[in-house]
Image (spheres, rainbow, N blue to C red):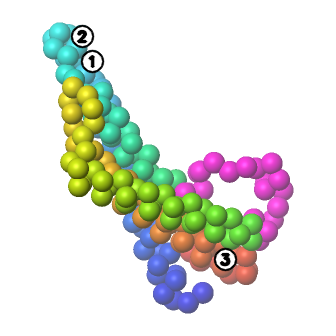
Amino acid sequence: MPEVIKRYVKYVDYVSEKFGRLAMYSVVLMIGVLILNAFTRNILNIPLSWCVEMAQFILAGYYFVGGPYSMQLGDHVRMDLLYDRYSDKTKAKIDVFTSFFLMFYLVCLLIGSISSTMYAIEYGQRKFSQWNPSMIPIKVIMVCAIVLMLLQALSIFFKDFAKANGKAIQ
């Protein structure tokens, strides 16, 4: 593999790992928000209308930003009915083939998320609730995460392509 591809793989894996670790810590933030909600609602008898929705936003960010890291680690869902029986080289060839479907899906998802984000920005979209938060931040996070997922999918494609040809990229 050319050196530029090796550097690309290394850089994208590094970025995915850092954002994935950030996503892991966001769970602690979400738990803190939910504990605050339980405390104020049950102990102080002051229900906070924004806590549950904030926890939902944090959880959505967790899924979005943690996806590329999960993909990098190979912890995503895979049909192992026949796949586990193949050699590493054959698995890599299958993964190279299926990468095109994944990237097509991610490009479609990216187009839709950009359109949705532009709509949110143009019309100042807000969630219809008592808290009424702006939807722009979570939609921007969604677009950025899908871009990172697409970059990570390309990185994995390069690794699988190299493995299928008998040369691993580390």
Question: Element at badge 3?
Answer: helix
Whether residue 110 is visible, yes or no, is yes
Q: In this picture, which residue range is highlighted in magenta?
A: 71-92
Q: Residue furthest bottom?
A: 2
Amino acid at circle 1: Ala
Q: Nearer the viewer, residue 120 or 104?
A: 120
The reply to whether callout 2 and callout 1 are in contact (CB within 8 Å) is yes
Q: Residues within 10 Å of mark 2 (few under 14, many from 20)?
A: few
What residue did someone put label 3 on? 161
Return the x and y of residue 57 as percentages of the image width and height: 32, 39
Q: Residue at x 22, y 14 (%)?
A: 41
Question: Which residue bears the numbered disc 1?
Answer: 38
Whole-angstrom CA distance, mark 2 to mark 1, is 6 Å
The quadrant in which the N terminus is found is bottom right
* Residue carrying label 2: 42
Residue 90 falls within the magenta-colored stretch = yes
Looking at the rendered structure, the kind of residue marked 2 is Asn
